[in-house]
Image (cartoon, rainbow, N blue to C red):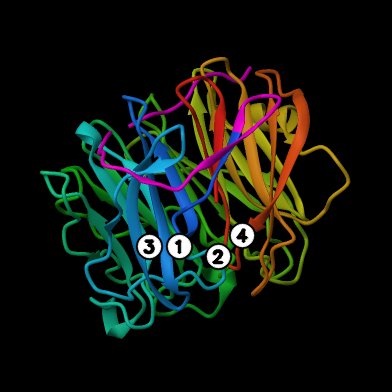
Amino acid sequence: MLTRVLTASAIAGTVFVGASQTPGRGVSLVRLPAAGIQPQASVDAGGVVHVVYFSGEPGNGDLFYATVTDAGAFSTPIRVNSEPGSAIATGTVRGARLAIGRNGRVHVTWNGSGRATPKATGGATPMLYARFDPQRRAFEPQRNLLQFAVGLDGGGAIAADEKGRVFVAWHAGGPDSKGEGDRRAWVTRSTDDGATFSREQAASDISTGACGCCGMDGLIDHQGSLYLLYRSAREVMNRDTYLLRSADSGRTFTSTKLQEWHIGACPMSTFALTENSDGVFAAWETAGQVQFARVSGGTADVGGNRVEMPGPSRNRRHPALATNARGEILVAWSEGTAWQRGGAVVWQVFDKNGRPMAETGRAPGVPVWGLVAAHARRDGGFAVIY
């Protein structure tokens, strides 16, 4: 059973970009402001949609934050990164991640670019973080959270909740790493709304490794458990999807293999998590196919509940998830995208039992290094941002 949406906070003032309405299940397409790519969206407890996106030169660009209405009107963008050119879009997997915390405070993390400061230990690539100031008018100066687990390549994850907890995760080998086979997922924790963070701790077992140029995703459910998704790199050929879950504020984790993928290369893939009243749901790519499953509760929920996207295509990448009050789930993804190549946005709505509703939608226009985000609208329909 699949049901209801997550939510988070607000800001206004509009710059209209525009949304196109799609017949069927009420899916609208929303284009980012000019030259914007790689959106991440989160909806707050008041139904306000918060978006972070990238703009600029792919290797050394900037992140912008805005809210967006159901009609596709964006608020005046606010730059997230305090140091110009300190974000990276190249490869699609290294971009910003967004979470909404206590009292609607916005938290953003991202891989630093080659020119980003402050650097991590020994001048290494930093895992950067910024949060809204108390007045919600600007972001505080960016900070590096990576203290010793250096070797950042693929993208990280962030999760926050109303208790003031903020978790930032990434995968890296650390200073003594010999390759992907000994990389691990690491987590740093804040209990004061991001004012301070702990020294990072390993979340995954070293035996799984971690796919160097793949992304992650994170979420805190309504029970307070932390979920993280990442891809392994065991014995080079095993690029499996793993779920990490912690019920004790990130101190210990259980690990569940969601699906195997035998490929002797880095697929540069990303993940998505969402929650409704029936549980937590994850979406991922395996061998060019996108699927989703209920993952709360562990392995018992996954095997029989995994739902693949309909149709013959095997070039599906970078899934996004959204769910509404009726328990319907939207899965959106990109097709045809590759290194330095854009593609199409595709989506499918499922009922709360995982059955497809209406036909699969498709539209051109995902730019180079682009991916898509999704959210439920106030009217119960869905929007896909790209």
Q: Residues within 10 Å of mark 4 (few under 14, many from 20)?
A: many
Q: Is residue 200 magenta?
A: no
Q: CA distance from mark 3 to mark 1?
A: 6 Å
User: Is residue 205 shown left or right of residue 23?
Assistant: left
User: Is residue 101 shown left or right of residue 293?
Assistant: left
Identify the residue shown where x is 71% and y is 41%: 291
| Magenta stretch, residue numbers | 1-27
Q: Label 2 is placed on what type of residue?
A: Thr
Q: CA distance from mark 3 to mark 2?
A: 12 Å
Identify the residue shown where x is 50% and y is 23%: 276
Looking at the image, the residue that sits furthest to the left is: 135
Identify the residue shown where x is 33% and y is 83%: 115
Q: Residues within 10 Å of mark 1 (few under 14, many from 20)?
A: many
- Residue 302 location, quadrant: top right
Disc 3 to disc 1: CB gap under 8 Å: yes
Q: Which residue is mark 3?
A: 110
Q: Which residue is mark 2?
A: 92
Q: Label 3 is placed on what type of residue?
A: Trp
Secondary structure under tag 2 reads loop
Q: Which residue is mark 1?
A: 95
Identify the residue shown where x is 37% and y is 62%: 110
Q: CA distance from mark 3 to mark 4?
A: 21 Å
Q: Which residue is mark 4?
A: 232
Disc 2 to disc 1: CB gap under 8 Å: yes
Q: What's the magenta bit mostly, secondary-structure-wise? A: loop
